[in-house]
Image (cartoon, helix red, strand yellow):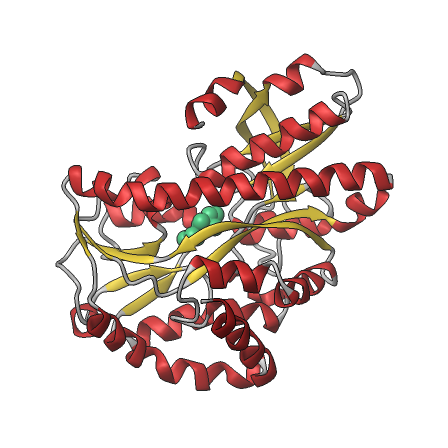
Amino acid sequence: MYKKLISMVVALIVVPVLFTGCLGSDKTEETTKTEAAVETKTEAAVETEVKDAKVIKISMGVNDKHPSYLAAVKFGEIIAEKTNGRYDVQVFANAQLGDDIKATEAVKMGNLEMAIPSASPLVGLDPDLNVLDLPFLFPNTKAADAVLDGPVGQKIAQKLEDNGLHLLAYYENGFRNITNSAHEITTPADLKGLKIRTMENKIHLAAFKAMGANPTPMPFSELFTAMQQETIDGQENPIPTIYLSKFNEVQDYCTLTEHVYGPHLLLINKDLFESMTPEDQKIFTDAATESKLYQRETNRAMAADYVEKLRAEGMIVTELTAEQKQAFKDACAPVYKEFEELIGKDLIDEVQAVIEKNK
Ligand code: TK8
């Protein structure tokens, strides 16, 4: 299936893209830049190309091997096919159009059509988003699906909607695991003194402090270099990202902590979506759902397969016993109290009730 998708990508065209950022409070920053970006055109898009096709650019931080990228390409193919090429969906990997926060801000402002960020760096949009970041909340993907595809997921989507962002689907980033270059980690004490990059998210920072590490937030695009130059000792991400981004080239150890489950959000500018005909809205929504199922399936297969691939390439991948995992959980327990007021006890209870029923 993977091969088939790759073969569907028929043309790689380098185009200069003018991207104007409109990006928050840092006014001293250069907000306009021209970047060379790689546009991937799908077979369907090429076949059905029409002159004045509406261009839909999708930005993401992960690379073009990641399931979120592959699914976005599929999403574009479905739309091109169903609209006879009236839309030209172009997918941009590697944060070429900005990291998660910047790209999402651009979508919100209408300077970019779509993005697939992690939810964690977007918590500034609404406190409710924080609920997904509570450490060791989700026991498995079944529970995560039940939360995200159910009323809680809709509640979060509404908060995004209030911010000018229409959520088309919850793709999966997945369960996050710690990697580092210093030594094997089996207890929270092993994290002591290690500088660990987290996403730009207060709960993640608090959780890593509580587990004994020295966490530092950073955008994803700066991560590989920071590990390579050893300005940080480690990071945490799902297995597909660790393997596909070749983090094992600069990190020797990985511990399967699965401390946070995170989605990748398939977001479109709300005004753009609302300007479409109901028929086109349905085509976009259906394509999102179809690509979501493919994305999750692919991501889960990779998460299972790539542990062995990482080992085969020399990484020491450590599975924790239930007792060992419990020690990390216990260390993180105070974080729930710390953020209860911000998130709201009702929402936390609601999520935990759904998880209880679906684990
Ligand atoms: C990519 C990110 C990435 C996330 C991170 O833009 O930042 O560590 O896991 O997938 O969304």
Would residue 56 be visible to someone looking at this image? yes
Q: Is residue 190 left or right of residue 341?
A: left
Quadrant of res 58? top right
User: Which residue reaches farthest front?
Assistant: 357
The N terminus lies in quadrant:
top left
The residue lying at 72 percent from left, 39 percent from top is 284
Where is 128 relative to 174, above or below?
below
Where is 225 relative to 219, above or below?
above
Where residue 120 sits in the image (x, y, percent)? Answer: 50, 61
The residue lying at 17 percent from left, 74 percent from top is 189
How many callouts does the rendering have? 0
Q: Nearer the viewer, residue 354 or 73?
A: 354
User: Which residue reaches farthest top?
Assistant: 47
Where residue 324 sits in the image (x, y, percent)? Answer: 20, 71
Q: Is residue 137 left or right of residue 212?
A: right
The residue lying at 66 percent from left, 67 percent from top is 151
Q: Nearer the viewer, residue 151 or 182?
A: 151
Where residue 202 sits in the image (x, y, percent)? Answer: 46, 71
Where residue 13 sits in the image (x, y, percent)? Answer: 55, 17
Would residue 219 be visible to someone looking at this image? no
The C terminus lies in quadrant:
bottom left
The residue lying at 58 percent from left, 67 percent from top is 129
Quadrant of res 311? top left
Quadrant of res 138? bottom left
